[in-house]
Image: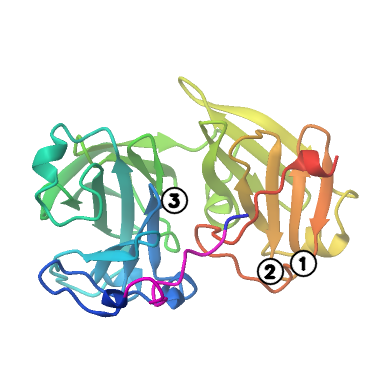
């Protein structure tokens, strides 16, 4: 079962954990940040957090819950109050000279972290600025992105999904894919027969069996696509009317809770009022998991156990 990281305030091992190391910019982090929505991203067991709301555009820091270490990123000027889209990823193979990086005060010098911040906009932009923080330099840099087809963020979507070194930002009519290492971006269309607004509100973008997948859920069915070499391919289209309780089907706020990382047929369905169901989309079987009603899942589903559909069917 995936659980919240160890309590960084637990000083049973080392009293020095309670001290601030201003020279190395190490700060303490309360477990509450994982509950109050200030987690902005997770990659290679390191979290990107903010001591403000992540949409504020400042106050970012990296946190390693295993080693109980945090590193504060340098401040980035906020010219105006607006929402910000945030991306975070790590490439453990990108660094060419680990010895060179080991002289810097970062959480893990063998891994190259990137943080991306974009001023969110809901009107289509064909050119916009992207701020990128690099763990190798410790500094922010700004790059201009030009897109022939343009892009517009969804008003309620502010975090990206990291996959194979790229950051995927959900938009109103397409997905913006940014490479924080090559410093370039492009757009990816939603599946042709999908409803992008429904996906952004109640669907899910993630991976299963190493492949990128996207799902949408409606009143009585769920669809799952996988990104092939050229386009999205429909894997599942399951009508669950009569197979799930009417209360769950009628819940406007039900959504796809996630994909199982190793079982492509297993998908989690979630409703704040009704709880969690494990779905096997090949055998069309659904199993209710008691005890999760009125439980609000975090943005990264940290507390979602990895139930296997094989455990029930």
Mark 1 and mark 2: Cα distance apart in space: 6 Å
**Which mark sits nearer the N-terminus, 3 or 1?**
3
Mark 3 and mark 1: Cα distance apart in space: 28 Å
Is residue 239 in view?
no
- The answer to whether residue 5 is magenta is yes
Label 1 with label 2: CB-CB less than 8 Å? yes
Q: Residue at x 52, y 30 (%)?
A: 211
Mark 3 and mark 2: Cα distance apart in space: 25 Å
Asked which secondary structure carries label 3, the reply is loop
Location of residue 55 in the rendering, given as x and y in whole percent from the top left corner: 33, 69
Among all residues in the image, which is located at the extreme right?
Answer: 242
Residue 272, labelled with which disc? Answer: 2
Give the labeled residue for mark 1. Answer: 274
Of 256 and 230, nearer the camera is 256
| 33 left or right of 280 in image | left
Q: Which residues are magenta?
A: 3-14
Question: Mark 3 against mark 1, which lies toward the viewer?
Answer: 1
Question: Dot 3: within a 10 Å radius of its alpha carbon, few (fewer than 14), some, or many (20 or more) residues?
Answer: many
């Amino acid at each position: 079962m995936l659980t919240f990281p160890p309590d960084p305030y637990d000083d049973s091992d080392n009293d020095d954990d309670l001290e601030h190391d201003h020279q190395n910019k190490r700060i303490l982090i309360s477990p509450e940040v994982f509950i109050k929505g200030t987690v902005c991203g997770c990659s290679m067991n390191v979290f990107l957090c903010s001591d403000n709301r992540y949409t504020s555009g400042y106050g970012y820091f990296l946190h390693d819950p295993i080693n109980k270490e945090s590193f504060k990123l340098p401040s980035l000027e906020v010219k105006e109050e607006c929402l910000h889209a945030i991306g975070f990823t790590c490439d453990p193979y990108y660094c060419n000279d680990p010895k060179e990086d080991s002289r810097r005060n970062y959480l893990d010098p063998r891994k190259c972290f990137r943080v991306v911040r974009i001023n969110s906009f809901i009107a289509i932009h064909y050119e916009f600025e992207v701020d990128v923080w690099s763990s190798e330099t410790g500094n922010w840099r700004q790059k201009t992105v030009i897109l022939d087809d343009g892009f517009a963020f969804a008003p309620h979507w502010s975090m990206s999904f990291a996959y194979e070194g790229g950051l995927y930002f959900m938009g109103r009519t397409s997905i913006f894919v940014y490479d924080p290492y090559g410093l370039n971006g492009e757009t990816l269309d939603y599946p042709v027969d999908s409803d992008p607004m429904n996906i952004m509100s109640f669907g899910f973008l993630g991976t299963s069996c190493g492949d990128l997948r996207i799902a949408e859920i409606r009143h009585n069915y769920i669809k799952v696509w996988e990104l092939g070499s050229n386009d999205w391919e429909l894997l599942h289209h399951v009508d669950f009317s009569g197979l799930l309780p009417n209360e769950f089907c009628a819940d406007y706020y039900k959504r796809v809770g996630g994909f199982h990382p190793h079982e492509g047929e297993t998908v989690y369905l979630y409703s704040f009022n009704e709880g969690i169901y494990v779905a096997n989309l090949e055998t069309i079987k659904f199993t209710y998991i008691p005890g999760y009603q009125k439980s609000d899942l975090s943005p990264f589903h940290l507390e979602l156990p990895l139930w296997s559909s094989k455990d029930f069917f």
